[in-house]
Amino acid sequence: MTAAGFPLPETDWAPTAPFWAAAADHRLSLPRCDACGRLVWYPADTCARCGGADHSWADLSGRGTLFSWVVVHQQFLPQYEPPFVTALVAVDEDPAARLATRLLDVDPLAPGLAVDQPVEIVFAPLRFPGVDGEVTAPFWRPISGA
Amino acid sequence: MSDGWGANVPLGDIGGRVAIVGVGESEHSRASGRTPTEIAATAVERALEDAGLRPEDVDGVMLGPGVPDQLDAAAFHGHFGTSHDLWESQAGGGMRWAATAPVPAAEALARGDASVIVNSFAVAWATQRGSMTGGPGQMHAEERFKANLEVPFGWFPQPVYFATIARRHMHQYGTTEAQLGAIAVACREHANATPTAVMHGRPLTLEDYLASPYLAEPFRKEDCCLISDGGAAYVMTTPERARDLDRPSVEVAGVGLGRSHTGTHWAQQGDFTSTPQAFAGPAAFAMAGIEPGDVDVATAYDPFTIVSLMQIEDLGFCPKGEGGAFAQAGELRVDGGALPYNPHGGMLSHAYVLGIAHVVEVVRQLRGEAANQVAGAEIGIYGGYTGPEAATLVLRRNAS
């Protein structure tokens, strides 16, 4: 079963709660391995690179590159009205860590995007028709003039 | 604990220890009201008839892990009215398990736990369509990292994951939409030559493909597999028993299994545009003592055009990154291609029964009995895929 409020995130689910708490504060925070300094994303008990078990949530710059994107035309979820642009963003501090996101400030019918172009974070409320509540979430947008 | 994104999973050497002596399929269709159990039972009935065996001769059943309403031992007895001892394993079914089922089967045959084992798989996802209940998106929507980090942003479900991979592949290697279209068109032509295919009688040209609207750009509808009701089964036994049956049989020559360390979290997969076939293929080919160039007919689990393309590359049928050009040059076609691929039409155009019908197709090809026959095929493969894992099954025609 999916959680109540789906497709809003469960902001109190322990493994990702610090991510959502930081977003509420307009910060991007991801766990970083204390041993090797790489980001541990998605959160896991051990670092996939070095096996280190101690990780600390670290604030990031909110700069990244557009790893890949898709213009969604089909309505896959009743709460999600197409068209929209969904994407993976590689964060500058460790591009192996990718964030799924929705791109803002892009016309889905004329996106004019290029893989690997620079993008920046923008915090905005995530809300869905017919679903109670909203959550402040990290979205990304092309860096203008880039 | 390395920067490697996945690994080979070592398997025991079962080359030449299992023979496939019978295959069967149910009708494949759009929504039909049938249950998976009924569909699987029909497929098993036909596979046994094909093998010249009676239900009483079967002493082992294999079915898929975690898939509801499959043909387990109790359902087998319920359908056939039998009550004898049946060895049962849930390491079978479709997807990558349709490729690896011969491994636990070989062990059971060697131990004497069973002498005739039937592996079956069926789905009724077309009937269940309309909600995500029981359908292919459900497990992804319920997985909590996805539910909390992907779904809220609309990065969901499978067509979106794999369209994202396709876009990256295009960027990395210059793959084009027309090249993806060449895969869809080849599979449709093959389905048009296969009367049991769901898309039989429904032609598709590259012009049709390119003119159709995007579903999850760069994907169009025809980049995505069907949603079907259907199933299939195959019967395994020892090579000695196979000889006694005096029916055409094929031998399991090699099996390989590969695994991605990031599981179904495709967003984080280190090599984003590869599949674990890169680890499975070499192991299976080594067990079989062959090279990719020895393969006469290939099938692979093909939920999306890009998944076919990546597996064809990862299995070594062309250099990495050249799968698009390979498809565009017509190399996947039964009619004159270097690597006749999914000659029944695959999941794109035959039926979405999760790979079990691919194995049936390879067996028929090697017996020279396929509807869309590759002339003189002696070695065939099935590439099974579940995302986190991929497996390669090499089958070889037995000298008659």
Image (tube, rainbow, N blue to C red):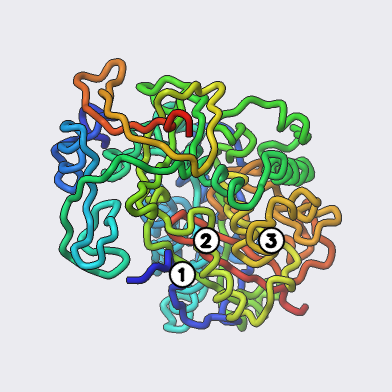
Which residue shows up at 49% across the image and 67% down it? Answer: B101
| Residue B187: percent from left, percent from top | 71, 45
Q: Which residue is mark 2?
A: B98
Mark 1 packing: few (<14 Cα in 10 Å), some, or many (20+)? some
User: For residue B206, what is the image quadrant?
Assistant: top right
Judge from the rendering whether residue B160 lies leftward or rightward of residue B146; answer left or right: right
Mark 2 packing: few (<14 Cα in 10 Å), some, or many (20+)? many
Q: CA distance from mark 1 to mark 2?
A: 19 Å
Judge from the rendering whether residue B248 lies leftward or rightward of residue A8; answer left or right: right
Query: Which amino acid, by three-letter code, is at mark 2?
Result: Ala
Camera-nearest residue between B238 and B220? B220
Q: Which residue is mark 1?
A: B59
Which residue shows up at 53% across the image and 50% down it? Answer: B354
| Residue B35: percent from left, percent from top | 46, 40
Frontmost of labels 1 and 2 is 2
Q: In the rendered structure, which disc, 1 or 2, sits on the residue that comes first in sequence?
A: 1
Q: CA distance from mark 3 to mark 1?
A: 31 Å
Frontmost of labels 3 and 1 is 3
User: For residue B148, what is the image quadrant?
Assistant: top left
Q: Which residue is mark 3?
A: B298
In the rendered image, the vertical position of residue A75 relative to residue A44, given as above or below: above
Query: Which of the chains bears the disc numbered 1?
Result: B
Q: CA distance from mark 3 to mark 2?
A: 15 Å
Query: Which amino acid, by three-letter code, is at mark 3?
Result: Ala
